[in-house]
Amino acid sequence: MSDIWQTLIANLAVVALFSSIWSLASDWLDKQLWIVRKSVIGILVGTAAVSTMLLSVEIVPGVVYDLRTCVVAVGAFFSGPLVAVIAIIMAGTFRFIEGGSGVAIGLAHLAAAGLVGLGVRSAARSPLPHPLWIVVLGAAMAVLLLTIVFILTRIANIEETGNLVVPGTVLSLLATLMMGFTMLATRQAGRDRAILRAALAQAPEFLYVKDIDGRFLTVNEAVARHHGYTEPSEMIGLTDFELTDADRARALYDQERGIMESRTPILDLEEDLVDSQGRRRSYRTSKVPLTGKDGRIVGLAGMTVDTTTVKQLERQVIESRDRLSLAMSEMSDGLALFDRDGYLVFCNDQYRDAFPRSAHVRVPGAHISDILLECARTGEQLGIPENDPEGWAERVGSLLRVPNVVTVELFNGSYLQLRNQTARNDAAVVIVTDVTDLKLAERALIEANADLSRQASTDALTGLANRRVFDETLQRDMARCGRAGTPLCLVLLDVDHFKHYNDFHGHQAGDVCLIMIANVLKSSLLRPADLPARYGGEEFAVILPDTGLQGAKAVAERIRMSIAETSKCELGTEVTVSLGIAEYDLGKSPSTPESLIRRADGALYSAKAAGRNRVMAATAE
């Protein structure tokens, strides 16, 4: 019995070793093509299974046991059928070469382990399963072992296999849990790294890292695009001398050498530069020196933000404020003078009129505290604490001779700006200006900006995304799906006989028809990531990221039938559409947005030529 424990513990060490190898190689594997990634993992799992078989326990001559099935099950659970098949072929071939009376049951055990892993994988339905599924897999492998032991002892009459029940069950469970949780943690870390990479790569700011000689070590997509490159990798190894004029490059080099030599970062450096098209643009740059583990400077990291738009808005705000100040200076503002003890000495009618509920106490001789308490009692000013009006009046009154500007809102929705200024003899002058129009203008400006933003991205008739948003989203989603190795489908939709419909029913009815189709598209797409857009005229488009061809066909067919049914109910006549689908799968057919649109359009033309009112898919490029 002790020999069994020792051998299986050695098996467990082999499983731990190969789990570590798989984990360390996961980052490299994620960058490979699907077939390469699956093949390498399959070979790695198969090698681990064979390695455990080199340390197997021989129950009787020709019948052995080891932890190969745990390795195969975990490989199948995390990486799917192809990995399971490769691992089973490798381990099964080795077991067949070993020979012995237990070959058949050994091969069956391997196949069953692969099926268990695939079965639990199917039940988990996630590339990043909940840890509970690892426990389920371990329990399933323990049950499978007990089943094999039962078969060998009761059917094959090999009583010695009974010695495997305790050590085999315990170590099978431990091996499955250890390898499973290791790979789950690796998956989670890989996902986090992928999200971080995507965030850095797609950030609108210019992010870059240079070595001590000023060569770019890494840049994000924004930097690459700014310098006219399609891929960030094309800039690796270049310096500013190869990207800009000699004077600018020398200035940047000297600046960055100074940062690294002094170990002092520069933060939020404002610069105005002329771009390649002769336009003056504003930038804000921060650069920090990077040190290695030994404390030496190894390079420099930088972030540059294009602040041109912000600067323009700031100038516009300042100009607007100056114009408002000029207009306000010619208005008759309210004015009041308080002495050093807080008693009202003088006020004009405009001051009293600005406070309709407390105007009767705003007379010479009134104390600021009495005025503020009346303001609180009548509910004239909003925002006064109801549970402590006296404390509020004392705090505000104490600020009377402190120069400040505050804006208060009154019960009637008006806003007053109160400006305190000190005068001679510690007196205080309060100037009251009605800034209601300014506040309303600010709100209107915010709403107008929001409305302009919506108009810039939305088709006015249908409310769907417009062509510009469609083009940007398709390019972005294709890039993301290409990096992630996931499919994407594009659906183009055209209304059948729409010109005849327009001629017969009129253009207003045609607009109602297009709006109905847009509403059907919105209701038919269940995922937030799916984008319906008006492509042009009576043609629509739907972007379906992370969706294969079969899924896209199902969505397109649902749209086609829904439009036909809805048109009969809402328009009183059946309107049919033809749809063309093209799939983008980087592993099968690398393409550009233009070629994907061209393929979908070809499929749409085929649907029209085949009789309309149908869905057709483009063949792979």
Image (cartoon, grey):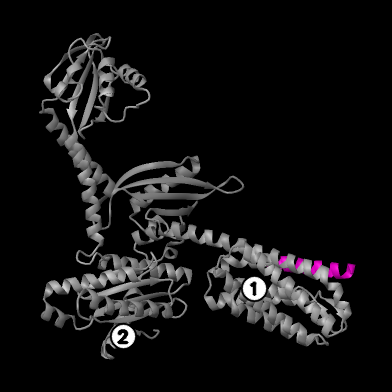
Measure how far apart labels 2 and 1 are at the Cα level: 42 Å
Name the residue that disc number 2 marks.
614
Residue 1 lies left or right of residue 103; in this view the side is right
- Residue 126 visible in this rendered orientation of the protein: yes
Residue 536 lies left or right of residue 479; in this view the side is left
The image position of residue 598, as x and y in percent, is: 30, 80
- Residue 41 visible in this rendered orientation of the protein: no
The image shows residue 344, relative to residue 544, as above or below, that is above
Front label number (2 vs 1): 2
Q: Amino acid at mark 2?
A: Arg
Label 2 crowd (10 A; few <14 / some 14-19 / many >=20): some
> 269 or 7, which is in the foreground?
7
Residue 590 lies left or right of residue 22; in this view the side is left
Q: Amino acid at mark 1?
A: Gly
Name the residue that disc number 1 marks.
75
The image shows residue 393, relative to residue 381, as above or below, that is above
